[in-house]
Amino acid sequence: MLQQLHIIAFTHRQLDVNKIGLLHIEKEAQVLQLEHLKAALGLKELMFLTTCNRVELTFVNEQDLDTPLLMRLLQTLYPKLVPIQLEEFARKAEVYSGTTAVQHALSVASSIDSMIIGEREIITQVRLAYEYCHALGLTGDLLRLLMKKVIETAKQVYTETSIATKPVSVVSLAYQYLKQLHIPLDARILIIGAGVTNTTMARFLKKHGFKNFEVVNRSIENAETLAAEIRGNAHALNDLKSYSNGFDVLITCTAAEGTIIDAALYADLLNGETQEKIVIDLAIPQDLDAQILNQYAVKYLSIEYLQRISNENVKERSKELQQVEEIIANARFEFQHLLRERKVELAMREVPARVKELRATAYAEIFKEELETLDPQAKEVLDKVVSYLEKKYISGPMKLAKEIILNHAD
């Protein structure tokens, strides 16, 4: 049973995040595409997981997972990919089967396989992915048992270790900084740059209740896209000099080769305000001219400082890895034992039905005439005796047989 379990993973270790994005399937489209994949390849069970830096297919199939099957799977699920793309994805796919698949699933949900170790969000993503595929009728008994153990183990990891106690992402650290300063939720937040980092930062702030956003970007289209998502206003970078709405928090992260905010532009952005401002500069190299810090009242947070804190927290989280790996190793062993028990249960589930058939035959055919001579009270006593023997015959020997099979299992 376990050797039929396979996982194909496309992660940040082998692929650029943008390329992983090509494998993302919107939730609405998953219904038809996954049902088609399962039917076309004759898969017994199927689950699809997608995050910002990971796409995984977990499935149950009698056929070994070799390169031809991998290519066929990719071609079926992603018909729009050209051959050179299919070949690259097949070459860079991480493939797991049997016990290694179980180990991988446990590691993913416990976050030690993540780009950022200890990020709790992955356990929710895994659970929701399974529940969605289960609702579509794509999963079965093996994935049910696996996901139950995976979620249970991940919860144990987050409860019994400190793997997730110290934030390590730049966004999380920057938010913690703002939280410590008790910034009001209606603070004016000026976001310069609409790339991945600022987009993540903006989503994080919106998620935590901030609501007053202005988005500035070289491409006005990208600014408008982000502004629409966080319900803010969009501006072109060329119009920044004439910006007159002021700000309480300035978050900047552009791909410029040098500073884009000098003292003169900063003065324009202040629009005559003199109170201390908060500036979070997430760009490399920095977007803010260092002279500004000497001329104006600024609480300044740089990417260098955040990365230094992040690295220290990563070291702290890494200290927990040994304990996490021990929890996962135990969970993997327990899951293998659980599967053996389940295999015995499935093999012996016909015994009770067979015993009931024998009883029915005995009453209706073999001892029919003798039973007809019994009075109602005698029949009632006989029924009780037979039911008792039937129950004991099913439970006792089945329990013994189960123990014998499990004790002699490899």
Image (tube, rainbow, N blue to C red):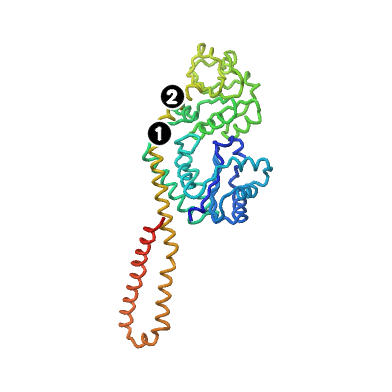
| Horizontal and vertical percent position of residue 146 | 46, 51
Number of numbered markers:
2
Answer with left or right where residue 212 lies relative to residue 360. right
Amino acid type assigned to the residue bearing label 2 in the image: Leu
**Of label 1 and label 2, which has the lower sequence position?**
1
In contact (CB < 8 Å): disc 1 and disc 2 = no
Q: Which of 133 and 353 is in front in this view?
A: 353
Image point 40% across, 49% down: which residue?
Answer: 333
Q: Nearer the viewer, residue 5 or 357?
A: 5
What is the quadrant of the C terminus in the image? bottom left
Q: Relative to 252, does residue 152 appear above or below in the rendering?
A: below
Image point 40% across, 47% down: which residue?
Answer: 331
| Horizontal and vertical percent position of residue 177 | 45, 25
Q: Relative to 166, does residue 260 appear above or below in the rendering?
A: above
Q: Nearer the viewer, residue 403 or 231?
A: 403
State how far apart marks 1 and 2 are (Cα): 20 Å
| Horizontal and vertical percent position of residue 131 | 50, 50
Image point 40% across, 80% down: which residue?
Answer: 362
| Horizontal and vertical percent position of residue 49 | 54, 45
Amino acid type assigned to the residue bearing label 1 in the image: Thr
Q: Mark 1 points at which residue?
A: 165
Q: In which quarter of the image is residue 343?
A: bottom left
Camera-nearest label, 1 or 2 = 1
Image point 56% across, 26% down: which residue?
Answer: 191
Q: Relative to 187, does residue 270 appear above or below in the rendering?
A: above
Q: What element carries label 1?
A: loop
Q: Name the residue under label 2.
A: 181
Characterize the local packing of mark 2: few (<14), some (14-19) or many (20 or more) Cα atoms within 10 angstroms: few
